[in-house]
Amino acid sequence: MTFLCAGVLSENNSTEEPLRLVGEASRCAGTVEVKHRGEWRRGVEASYDWDLGDIAAVCRDLDCGSAVSGEDRQGFPHSPVWSIRLDCVEKSTVTECVERTDSSSSQALEVECSDSVRLVSGSGLCSGSVQIWNQSWTWLCEEALDLQGAEVLCRELGCGAPSLLQGAVSPLGLQTFHCEGHESALMDCPRSTSGTCSSGAAVNLTCSEPLRLVGEASRCAGTVEVKHRGEWRRGVEASGPWVLRATAAVCRDLDCGSAVSGGTRGGFLQSPVWRIRPDCVKKSTVTECVIGTDSSSSQALEVECSDSVRLVSGSGLCSGSVQIWNQSWTWLCEEALDLQGAEVLCRELGCGAPSLLQGAVSPLGLQTFHCEGHESALMDCPRSTSWTCSSGAAVNLTCSEPLRLVGGASRCAGTVEVKYRGEWRRGEAFGRWDLRDTAAVCRDLDCGSAVSGGTRGGFLQSPVWRIRPDCVKKSTVRECVMSTDSSSSDGLDVVCSDLLNRPIISLSVLDGPSEAQPQGVRVLLGSKFRVKCSVEPQFPGGSFQLLSPSVDLAQNHTLPAVNHSAHFLFSDTSPAHKGNYTCVYHLQVFNHNFSSQSHALQLYVGSSDSHLIFKVLVTLPLIVIVILLLYYCKVRATRGASEAPEVELELDLFGSS
């Protein structure tokens, strides 16, 4: 049998593996030691704290089971150590991530991996197909476990109770492992029959995450607590500020709804806590991102998730297909909501008013939810009929972002304000704010591209919401709000390209009648007409440019805006005037040039009255002649049927002449 074990010779290798765990009875638990430059030394973290995802890399390289716990522990004799770059180990082997710098420390990395069981190919450390160690890793067969065996296995891996067990419980009770439930490891349970099989016939197990929210009436709101190394403690952020995107990870791991709010709150008793890395939880489970160092704090993470509704597969937390909790998450069917129901749902999720509602409003008003609009949650609304359907027939909802620009001349310019935890506050940048961050504000407001933006002082000292600039480039502004309470006299000023209102275009004929047509106006040949460009009062000055069907006709038509409008005159209308006309408003404001374009207005060209009279005088006699000829032919044909010889004679005579 060929396998690699730290500190042991393998059949195909004549040297030791340069990684081992020492100080414990098991080869899969102990203090990390690395052999580098021919010398064994303790391993310590090089650049940031050691979390469970990094520990999983050690377990992987040692061919041990799943990562159970780990910590950066002190109290060792001060001696030379090897520094390990933890941002490297998830993609490379641990020994490839040793930094070539000599340093000394009294710290060490303590690691515990499961010794004889692991879950593979799952979404995290607490789910996957079951493998057991039997001189090598082999698949655990279907019908090998009962629920008590699954509970033992989940507990051995440092996870919560089993939430899903597929292909395990035998209808005849002929499972391989006969656990009573109190055992500390699956291999401690009495067992019978062979557990070896192919991967396609293996047990699939999902254990719940050792994570909970406490202190509120709902399981989806409260103070974050994590179970690590067998102990429940409050969770606090570790190496960066906690934003709503990190809160969404907690909601995801608890199988709750969408993230509504979350952040750090003080005022707790000083006690040991588990630190959680916010930058880690976006890609991994929360428990994988726990840092095992002992520390105390009077702070905690407070999280609120929507309890019974969520939006999935959207571009952010305020858009997606609607799901409702009914013992499990089910899709909300088309025609299930009206606009009032959508408003309640958006408000429940901490978002703005609904801006797009697809496949929802029933033409007969037969929606599932009958909301009045004042309800705090969708499930508070009276409801009828079933809402269960497939994803392809689900309601798609987009709520506007709870974001606005105030104090400017347009909704696309001004000071940034964000609504979070039900309160509008100025936004303050937590870090350097550049034009790319401004572009994120313009994007969320549907205001075009960024023109200018940055931090400005001089505001009254008041509570603000801090915004992470490094976050908004990939997420919505609301998802990047830090909910720690702080006050400031600074704010963010933003100007977007869609600053100007859209101009209005209209057309009138000066010397004759006109006829309204779809999307435009019909004007007679030879007439005079006027195109008016105007804009709602917003800024003084500016100019209007008229774009016409022909460059020659336009003659570079640009006129200054007088009383927010300009008039363009055309005489002797010809077929060349036919086509689309558009007004473009140009203005310089805030030392930047802006422009805004109107909808197109189509001009149809028709004939004048004189042309019509001429056509009538010419064509009317021709029409009369044609009618007389047809009548004459009909009479002749009738006579020909009764006087055939005479007709033949007449034809002959006509032919001879």
Image: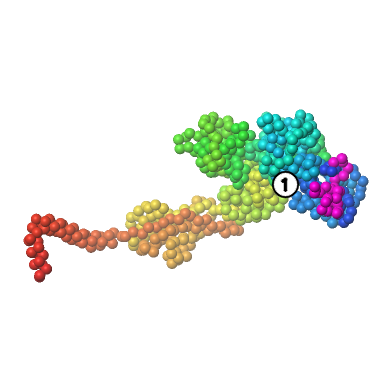
Hey, which residue is sitting farthest bottom in the picture? 657
**Is residue 334 on the magenta stretch?**
no
Residue 522 point in image, percent of width and height? 36, 56
Using a 10 Å C-alpha cutoff, classify the residue at mark 1 as few (fewer than 14 neighbours), some (14 to 19) or many (20 or more): some
Which of the 4 image quadrants contains residue 102?
bottom right
Q: Label 1's element?
A: helix
- Left or right: residue 646 versus residue 374 is left
User: x, y percentage for residue 357?
Assistant: 53, 42
Question: From the image, which quarter does the C terminus lie in?
Answer: bottom left
Q: Is residue 581 above or below residue 371?
A: below
Camera-side residue of 291 and 528: 291
Q: Where residue 576 sits: x, y (%)?
A: 39, 64
How many discs mark residues in the rendered view? 1
- Left or right: 500 in relation to 231: left
Which quadrant of the figure has residue 613?
Answer: bottom left
Q: Write down the quadrant of residue 99 in the picture.
A: bottom right
Q: Amino acid at mark 1?
A: Asp
Residue drawn at point x = 50 percent, y = 58 percent: 584
**Start and end of the magenta stretch?**
1-26
Q: Main secondary structure of the magenta part?
A: loop
Residue occupying the point 60% across, 40% down: 311
Q: Residue 514 placed where, x, y %?
A: 35, 55
Q: Residue at x 27, y 60 (%)?
A: 612
Q: Residue at x 50, y 37 (%)?
A: 335
Q: Which residue is mark 1?
A: 279
Residue 4 is one of the magenta-drawn residues: yes
Q: Along the line of sight, which residue is nearer the eye, 542 or 447? A: 447
Q: Is residue 295 visible?
A: yes
Measured along the vertical axis of the image, is residue 342 above or below residue 540? above
Colour scheme shown: rainbow
Position of 558 compared to 26: left or right? left
User: Is 109 in front, or is 519?
Assistant: 109
